[in-house]
Image: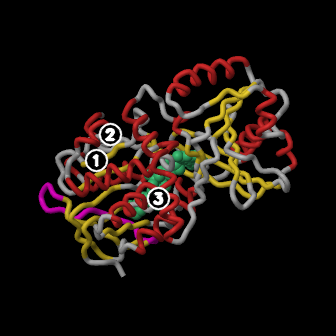
Amino acid sequence: MLPKTADVVIIGGGVVGCSIAYQLAKQGVQCTVLERSRFGGGASGAAAGVISPLWHVDPAVEPMWRLGMRSLELFPPLAAELSAAGIDPEFRQTGVLKLAFTEDQVDDLRRNLVWQSELGLDVAWLDPAQVAQREPEVRPAVLGGVFSPREGYVRGQRLVDSLVHAAGRLGAQFHQGTEVLGLRRRGRRVTGVDTPAGGIDAGQVVLAAGPWSGIPARWLPEAQDPDSPAIPVRPVKGERILLRKPGFLPRSPVRNFEGYVVPRLDGTVLVAATREEGRFDELVTAGGVSQLIAAATLSFPSLADAEFISGRAGVRPATPDGMPVLGPMPEIEGFSIAAGHDAVGVMLSPGTAELMAQYLLDGNAAPLEPFSLSRF
Ligand SMILES: Cc1cc2nc3c(=O)[nH]c(=O)nc-3n(C[C@H](O)[C@H](O)[C@H](O)COP(=O)(O)OP(=O)(O)OC[C@H]3O[C@@H](n4cnc5c(N)ncnc54)[C@H](O)[C@@H]3O)c2cc1C
């Protein structure tokens, strides 16, 4: 049964929505998450879960950089809290290894190493012998690599499950199979949501619907312009596969310039990810799978005879400038957005939730200004 009221209703039970719910529940806010399929059923459950701001966040884009580094800092205590509450999100700070197989790639890694070393994060260049010492099955043609010890990985679906569990224990409500079909309004204020199972009146509504966050713009007719969606989030499909090779598991995520090989605690190896603009479908394709196998065997030739377990696709939520949209919807009261994290939503989820929960508690949007919708 849906509640009739909530302090905050969150639309979307991916990693972003569930992380915000957990932070709010910790502060005693009564919040309800509505998910139309199942928690983590979108990109969040499909993600590779690599937590690597050094490789995925441009240090020149300061707000993103701060969000990435803050999230990296938040992950270890968050994972410990979630484990203590009952479900281990399988975060491991194993470090991340990035490999170069051409001279251009060596130059690229070494260029990045200059600023990364200045951060005091113990990032180090490994020559081929040192790479082989860390990961004996790496292709011998490797020219070197960079190891960054503070980064790691988490299992996307387990992170979502652990957030739902921990927030639920603190009183948050979670309803899956419940699609939000529209917003309740009083003048310029959003006052709740409508679903097929009934409506909920809410003090605040947060849109965390991932790549589908552009669609509810139709719920706000005044924010409409047919040529420019009010919330410019677009879909970017990604595929990943799971392999198993008895006796083989990398010690950490290993990246080359084509893709990632990520260990999982159950002994399987996740290989990610393809990237296709403008696609909402979640089909696993022959082309996608062969691209991923090529990426995996470039680093680890012995994976060619690994058992193929499964493939999965998810849809990333991308924005025109690569930064998420966080904060209030301009001109509308009681309605905010947390969407558009593209390929780094799992990694940025703790920092995002911290910022959003703080805004929902004190109403001060200033810290979210760099991510505001009005920048477009
Ligand atoms: C193959 C792949 C690999 C990836 N690897 C990584 C990685 O290594 N590291 C990383 O940080 N990120 C990675 N990502 C990106 C990451 O998965 C996303 O950035 C992140 O999951 C986005 O989370 P979200 O909660 O915004 O969206 P989603 O997970 O898509 O959640 C949004 C939810 O909203 C629900 N919804 C939509 N409309 C409604 C409605 N009207 N009512 C109710 N519910 C609704 C959807 O059903 C969905 O479950 C990867 C993505 C893919 C596809």
Of residues 192 and 298, the one nearer the viewer is 298
- The picture places residue 191, in percent across and down from the top left corner, at 20, 64
Taking the spot 67% from the left edge, 26% from the top edge, the residue there is 125
Relative to residue 166, is residue 95 drawn left or right?
right
Q: Quadrant of the C terminus?
A: top left
Given contact means CB atoms under 8 Å apart, are the residues at marks 3 and 2 in contact?
no
Q: Is residue 280 visible?
A: no
Marks 3 and 2 sit apart, C-alpha to C-alpha, by 19 Å
User: Dot 2, crowdedness within 10 Å: few (<14), some or many (≥20)?
Assistant: some
- The picture places residue 167, in percent across and down from the top left corner, at 41, 68
Q: Which residue is mark 3?
A: 14
| Three-letter code, disc 2 | Phe
Of residues 197 and 201, the one nearer the viewer is 201
Q: Is residue 180 on the magenta stretch?
A: yes
Q: Which residue is mark 1?
A: 327
Marks 1 and 3 sit apart, C-alpha to C-alpha, by 17 Å
What's the magenta region?
Answer: 176-189
Distance from mark 2 CB to nearest ligand 1 atom below 8 Å: no
| Three-letter code, disc 3 | Gly
- Return the disc, 1 or 3, that comes first in the chain's sequence: 3
What is the number of callouts on the image?
A: 3
Taking 311 as reference, is 301 above or below it?
Answer: above
Taking the spot 83% from the left edge, 39% from the top edge, the residue there is 136
Q: Quadrant of residue 126?
A: top right
- The picture places residue 281, in percent across and down from the top left corner, at 56, 51
Q: Is residue 125 visible?
A: yes
Q: Secondary structure at mark 2?
A: helix
| Three-letter code, disc 1 | Gly
Find residue 61 and name its label: none
Q: Secondary structure at mark 1?
A: strand
Q: Quadrant of the N terminus?
A: bottom left
Distance from mark 3 CB to nearest ligand 1 atom below 8 Å: yes
